[in-house]
Image (cartoon, helix red, strand yellow):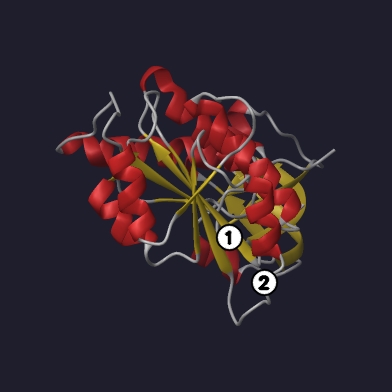
Amino acid sequence: MTRPLFFAPAADVQAARPGAVFVLGGDEGRHAATVRRLTVGERIDISDGDGARLGGVIAAVGAGTVELVIETTERDPSPRHRLVLVQALAKGGRDEQAVEAATELGVDAVVPWHAERSIVRWRGDKAEKGRQKWATLVGAASKQSRRSFVPDVHPVLDTAGLAVWAASIDHVLVLHEDADLALAGRAVAIGAEPAGGGPVTTAVVVGPEGGISDTEVARLAAAGAGTVRLGPHVLRSSSAGPAALVLLNQLLGRW
């Protein structure tokens, strides 16, 4: 069985060495000791959320703390192909469902998008509160799926901002039911490209319940994005992104 994973400050994790005792405190320590009720002798992993991972055995459990004797220190490799989900804000928590599933599926970053037809709106103070809510969701999903990398959650973008951002990304694929090109075909082409010096980033753009407008498609196309078809059926906003990520993970060799 995969060992439970907890997060700790990067400086503490990166300074740890085999044979030393690591004290896990704060919210994570309380969760391990009080909620999970872990006991002496159990093995757990601790990560900084940026790829560093410690493995060891619990030597003591206190009131909201766990002491771990470190056995291994390692750094999980960064993917050669980075995947980003651009998720339009959607009602009924469907956007949050998509973000949670995408995290479990290995997405590397999430971009909230104020699409023209988004019913949900993050305005003023709600923008940062919404981002923080997604960040908390991403952190919990990373822990559940034992990921040592916690995806970045970007500030919310409108379509103009998204077009500027898209122009800096290697590949931007807009899921659209009327697209002529299948996502699988585009993914194969991306995977066949010669590897450069750094990672290649592919972003998947998912619209809201009402779909992506023609104006938005044109604006993103002008920034270098292309439309792709996921399959013969129209998926909900909550499932389209995760479905695309599953396919990309396989065809790009991430799985």
Specify the farthest residue to the front: 180
187 versus 177 height, above or below: below
- Identity, as a three-letter code, of the amino acid under mark 2: Glu
68 versus 127 height, above or below: below
Specify the farthest residue to the bottom: 197
Which of the two marks, 2 or 1, is nearer to us in this view? 2
User: Which residue: 67% across, 62% down?
Assistant: 189
User: Which residue: 74% across, 56% down?
Assistant: 55
Label 2 secondary element: loop
Determine whether, in the image, residue 163 is placed left or right of residue 64: left
Neighbour class for label 1 at 10 Å: few (<14), some, many (≥20)?
Answer: some
Label 1 secondary element: strand
Residue 230 circle label: none
Disc with the residue nearer the chain's start (2 vs 1) = 1
Residue 20: give x, y in percent of width and height: 70, 65
Q: CA distance from mark 2 to mark 1?
A: 14 Å
The answer to whether residue 121 of the structure is visible from this angle is yes
Q: Are marks 2 and 1 in contact (CB under 8 Å)?
A: no
- The quadrant holding residue 101 is top right
Specify the farthest residue to the right: 1
Residue 252: give x, y in percent of width and height: 71, 58
* Number of callouts: 2
- Identity, as a three-letter code, of the amino acid under mark 1: Arg
User: Which residue: 69% across, 66% down?
Assistant: 77
| Residue holding disc 1 | 82
215 versus 14 height, above or below: above
Closer-to-camera residue (231/131): 231
Closer-to-camera residue (33/134): 134
- The quadrant holding residue 202 is bottom right
